[in-house]
Image: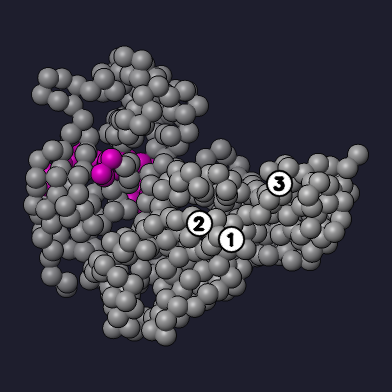
Amino acid sequence: MPSKTHVTALINGEEMEFLCEPRQSLLEVLRETLGLMGAKEGCNNGNCGSCNIILDGVLVNSCLVLAVEIQGRNVTTIEGIATPEGLHPLQQKFIEHAALQCGYCTPGFIVASKALLDQNPDPSEGEVRAWLAGNLCRCTGYDRIVKAVLDAADS
Amino acid sequence: MQSFEYAAPKSAEEVVRLLAGKNGDARILAGGTDLLVQLREGRRSAKLVIDVKNIPELTQVTFDPKSGLRIGAAASCSQICSDSNVSDHYPGLVDAIKLIGGVQIQNRASVGGNLCNASPAADAIPALIVHKAVCQITGPNGTRILPVEEFCVEPGKNAMGSGEFLTSISVPTPKEYFGAGYLRFIPRNEMDIAVVGAGASVALDEGGMKFVSAQIALGAVAPTPLLASDAGAFLSGKEIKREYVKEAARMAQSVAKPITDLRGTAEHRKHLVAVLVERALDRAIERAGGKYAK
């Protein structure tokens, strides 16, 4: 078995260190080594978006990133979205619009939507829908999700 | 996932050395959107994964009006599409590249990887072919050049030897009165694999009334992406007329050898080839500033 690699990265603003095998995905390490259980494993092949994180400002599927790749890099997970003062407007609007049913896909949707609003603070409905095409919700909550994102953008 | 070692070299020379040391058991990692899934599902194996994203020449996108566009093999789709030189000079490439997955995939997946994965349905490949793009392949004997249409040899297999890897893709500078376009058919709006893809490019005369030359390439209708050379050659020297464009689309249809699978029947794919080639040609003609003869 290949030896473990020591990785240091900035995760949700905090410098963290961990040991991982090269074969481990970032998603696996976030959940099983670092105890950050917010990112979810849905498909584990890049289709569902449930494991979305922001890596150096860019939205990615953490199931398709090797943990060894994040040495020295900056990661934001769903756990880093709210502040001690309160929920992020996206989180607040997801609650107000009831933009979730089972909630499994929600961390991915919130992280993806944050990445959208970070680069486009005033998206059209079409832009929101196109951006969220890589996130699947199997409770069919898309309409409320889109409304929540548009409302968060307004606020 | 199976166990492997990981290396993140800083130079192409180091990659060549690492590949030689593993005798075919090493895999190149760019965005990982194909490779990591294939390793996880046991469809490919690796003793060593070589991450090439720390090599500047593999991640850069550069444009020079004389030498054209050079796309580093590991440059991500979103990096390529957001480059103003690419959107200004190569809208036909952007047509195809922006279709590869959603935002998360675009941010990681590379056009080089789309090519190396050698899927018959890869969106970028027909678009690269009609732009006469070439691959720079580096190996133990230095660098060699291969036209994109010769790069894929069967589904999932490319023309590179085990000690070689793709360093970049070069696309010539479009001349005046050149235009290109790519279209695909999928049964939904986003996030799907082409049932059929069609790329076309045209070079027109100065008045925009006649074809000087044309290229047509097809995806998902043969074991590899296909250059429909006769269909393109047919248009050379012809006036821009609907009947000629339709004839070229029919000729492209005749070289398509689709199969029936879960995405569509062979018959449906044949039908789609003619429809998409005509539309791709229309888009190319419009971008080239051409006009249909009355």
Q: Which residue is mark 1?
A: B172
List x then y, in percent, for residue A150. Answer: 39, 19
Q: Give the main secondary structure of the magenta stretch.
A: loop
Q: Give the quarter of the figure containing the C terminus of chain B.
A: top right
Which residue is found at the position 79% from the left and 46% from the top?
Answer: B208
Which residue is found at the position 31% from the left and 14% from the top?
Answer: A155
Q: Give the quarter of the figure containing the N terminus of chain B.
A: bottom left
- Of the two numbered discs 1 and 3 on the same chain, state the one appearing first in sequence: 1
**Identity, as a three-letter code, of the amino acid under mark 3:** Ala
**Identity, as a three-letter code, of the amino acid under mark 2:** Asp
**Quarter of the view holding residue B125:** bottom right
Q: Which residue is mark 3?
A: B288
**Inter-mark Cα distance, 2 to 3:** 20 Å
The magenta stretch is A34-57
**Inter-mark Cα distance, 2 to 1:** 10 Å
Question: Which label is found at residue A49?
Answer: none
Q: Residues within 10 Å of mark 3 (few under 14, many from 20)?
A: many
Name the one closer to the observer, B287 or B205: B205
Question: Which label is found at residue B64?
Answer: 2
Residue B53 seen in render:
yes
**Quarter of the view holding residue A142:** top left
Looking at the rendered structure, whether the residues under marks 2 and 1 are on a common chain is answered as yes
Chain under disc 1: B
Q: Residue furthest right?
A: B294
Q: Nearer the viewer, mark 2 or mark 3?
A: 2
**Identity, as a three-letter code, of the amino acid under mark 1:** Pro
